[in-house]
Amino acid sequence: MEAPTILGAIPFLRDFPPYVTYSWLAMVVLIGAAVAVKSKLSLVPSGLQNFMEVIAEFALSTSNNNIGHHYGETFYPLLGTIFLYIVTCNLFGLIPGFESPTSNINMTASMAVPVFLLYQFYGIKVHGFKYIKHFLGPIQGLAALPLMIFMFFLEILGHCIRPITLSVRLFGNMIAKHLLLLVLAMLVPAFIPIVILGLGTLISVIQAYVFMLLTTLYLAGAVEEAH
């Protein structure tokens, strides 16, 4: 049986799984932060505005460096949102009485599948029918037809596995983090809490960055020209 959570004590939220209610809470937190920053924009950023601008610059540089300036500015709001959302969800697991939504495979899959559909959509939008060249391998032509057929099915398989690995990677790391921190807290309860919070925060940020970076690379591979 799952341990009770704070949101689970609210009557109208009891019928919803914790990973759903805490994902809603993450949305509320991020939307609230965005509204707060927008209402107090300043030419000299400070506090929350400064933090949000750092995240925006980080997402923009990651997008431009991996996708290119032509499409980098198109995708960076998505990448920044993914990073902030996953970090927020991950950090909930460090708060007593809260639960990390990303420790549930349904939650991580609900982000991985749209990423898969999105980069395939942009690949078709940018290249049209020529997008199929991305699945035929580096050597193309009638002489290489058997190799092209083999590479096509291999690439299709690889692309179909991507949403699975993307969701399982985040889910597995968050579950492992929770178990590891729980064991450490039981072994050394007097000293380890500070170390637990530091390690948990580091893992939460790294896993959010990995998810964002892989999304960036998938988008970059979809919109680039096939060679």
Image (cartoon, helix red, strand yellow):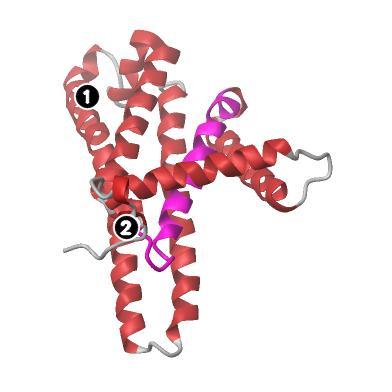
Q: Main secondary structure of the magenta part?
A: helix
Taking the spot 52% from the left edge, 46% from the top edge, the residue there is: 29
Segment tinted magenta in the rendering:
71-99
Where's the C terminus, which quadrant? top left
Apparent side of residue 115 relative to residue 168 in the rendered image (left or right): right
Picture coordinates of residue 30, whole percent (x, y): 53, 43
Indicate the quadrant where residue 136 lies: top left
Of residues 172 and 81, the one drawn nearer to the viewer in this rendering:
81
Q: Is residue 198 above or below residue 120?
A: below
Q: Quick one: which residue is furthest to the front in this view?
A: 11
Q: Which mark is residue 132?
A: none
Residue at horizontal 44 percent and vertical 76 percent from the top: 196
Q: Which quadrant of the rendered structure holds the N terminus?
A: bottom left
Q: CA distance from mark 1 to mark 2?
A: 51 Å
Residue 85 covered by magenta stretch: yes
Q: Nearer the viewer, mark 1 or mark 2?
A: 2
Give the class, few, some or many, for how many residues have Cα within 10 Å of label 2's Cα (few <14, many ≥20).
few
Q: Whole-percent x and y of residue 142?
A: 23, 12
- Mark 2 and mark 1 in contact (Cβ < 8 Å)? no
Residue furthest to the top = 129
Q: Is residue 27 magenta?
A: no
Amino acid of disc 1: Phe
Work out whether mark 1 precedes mark 2 in sequence or the reverse, and give the earlier one.
2
Q: Residue at x 47, y 37 (%)?
A: 216
Q: Position of residue 218 (x, y in %)?
A: 40, 34
The three-letter amino acid code for the residue at tag 2 is Ala
Asked if residue 44 is positioned above or below residue 90 in the image, the reply reads above
Q: Is residue 195 left or right of residue 16?
A: right
**Relative depth, front residue between 153 and 161:** 161
The residue pinned by badge 2 equals 9
Q: Which residue is mark 1?
A: 152
From the top left corner, tell me how far across and down residue 11 is, in percent.
30, 50
